[in-house]
Image (cartoon, helix red, strand yellow):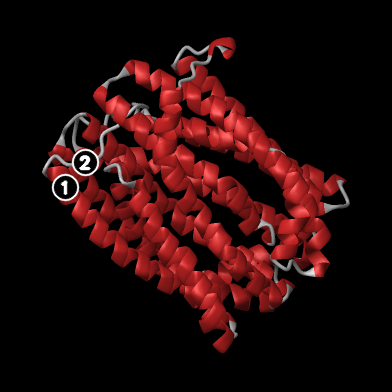
Amino acid sequence: MLGRKNIDATKGPILQLIILYCIPLILATLVQTLFNAIDVAILGNMADSTSVASVGATTAIFHLLVSGFVGIASGLKILLARHIGAQDSKRILESVGTSLIFSFIFGILVAVLGFLLSPVFLNLTKCPADCYDGAVIYLRIYLGAAPAILLYNFGSSVITANGDTQRPLYYMLAGGVINLVLNIILCLILPQKVVAVAVATAASQIFSAILTLKRIFKLYDLKLKKIPFSFMSLFAMLRFGIPLAITNTLYPLANLQIQSAINSFGSAAVAGSSAASNLESIASSFTSSFATTTSVFISQNIGANLSERVKQSFFYNLCLGITAGFVIGGFLYLTGDFWLSLLLGSESAEAVGFGKIRLFFVTLMYFIAGANGVLSNTVQSFGYPVVSSISSIFCILVFRIIWMSFVYPAFPNFYCLNACFTVSWILLLLCNIVFATIFFRRYLRGKYKHL
């Protein structure tokens, strides 16, 4: 079982399969987080806190431009998993080819928009003047690799929906090594450290995308001049993916106003929040992996009409997601001073203080995010991504706008600013519990959205 790359969610001991499927996902996300942290650590130790802030100031903008399309990739994963569960080879091939063409075209669009509008976005988020120029350069170089970033994400969705989470891990490791080596070499050569880190990161994304595409072409025997495209597959993918794209976009969009407030506290706050965000990604690698596993396992078993395995997939992933968020989030908070000092350097006590506040309100509460991930993916897998998107619109976007417009101005401190994350998660959890219960019951009565 351990040597098997393709896991069939419709057969075998389901808890064991979930763990085997999820471990490479967790490791792949941890590797990505590790190399993101290396970017910050290299800048913190080879340059100064302004360079760290230059990278940190771009985070919300980058996610806003890219995460929407990554949401569509999540929709593809649900769609493809259902086809795989139903063993519909024709629709599988059409979905794969359509997703590759779509991701490449829109990756180019993101790259062009990113290059033209980077200064506009940074002005909207009130990027501090001392790190503005570096942030523009970093954002433009990184977004230049958007076609590769989207191809990798869509390609990874294709591979993981097929039950293989090991190869995406290998590709991430290979890209991470490229990133690390180039980071060191370019930071030693180039006077502008932000440029060095941006080029290294973009190059690693391109390399990972090439490896991913090579695997997909071999797996489905595709030819570059004969990649299948189907408008029916595109519409089905968008039907699942657009609501998820909206949901994914809401988080960075809602966070733009928060990022502006963080920027107003100065470079130390930006650097501290950026470093804490890297630590948060460690907790997220566990909770998001169980959320992804939920959608694949539930969708495959819906396609195969195995309702008992659908229930087991939900229960095991929910328990594992909450437990992982509680244990990992708690550990990172309790040891936060050490990790923040490591990322930011020994002379960044003020930045460490800001980072620790964010860890309390976000990382320590990641068990809530673990529950939300599994519950929302359950609703989406049953064919109701619009409902999940609407919940996020009100609980994340609308609520955070209200908080930042009324609550934060009354208590304009860093504690109140970060509490916005925690309270919005709790509201979303309540909505997810209600809708997951409703649609689970509908599914058990045979009433769910078919493709």
Query: Quarter holding the C terminus?
Result: top left
Q: Quadrant of the N terminus?
A: top left
Q: Residue at x 77, y 47 (%)?
A: 116
**SS of the residue under disc 1:** helix
Say few, some or many: other residues with alpha carbon within 10 Å of mark 1 (under 14 / 14 to 19 / 20 or more): some
In the structure shown, which secondary structural element does the residue marked by tag 2 occupy?
loop
Judge by depth and name the residue closer to the eye, 194 or 150.
Answer: 150
Three-letter code for the amino acid on which mark 1 is drawn = Arg
Vertical order, 193 against 21 (above or below): below
Instruction: Specify few, some or many for label 2: CA neighbours under 10 Å numbering under 14, 14-19, or 20 or more.
Output: some
Q: Which amino acid lies under the numbered mark 2 shown in the image of this protein?
A: Tyr
Residue 51 pos. (x, y %)? 77, 61
Q: Which mark is residue 442?
A: 1
Question: For residue 83, which quarter of the picture?
Answer: top left
Residue 189 in the figure: left or right of residue 403: right
User: Where in the figure is residue 23, as x and y percent of width and height?
Assistant: 38, 43
**Sooner in the amino-acid sequence: mark 2 or mark 1:** 1
Name which residue lies at 75% across and 67% down: 49
The CA span between labels 2 and 1 is 6 Å
- Which percent across, then down, holds residue 156? 48, 33
Q: Nearer the viewer, residue 330 or 58?
A: 58
- Image quarter for residue 302? top left
Q: Nearer the viewer, residue 227 or 24?
A: 227
Q: Are marks 2 and 1 in contact (CB under 8 Å)?
A: yes
Q: Which residue is mark 2?
A: 448
Q: Is residue 232 left or right of residue 217?
A: left
Residue at the outermost right position: 191
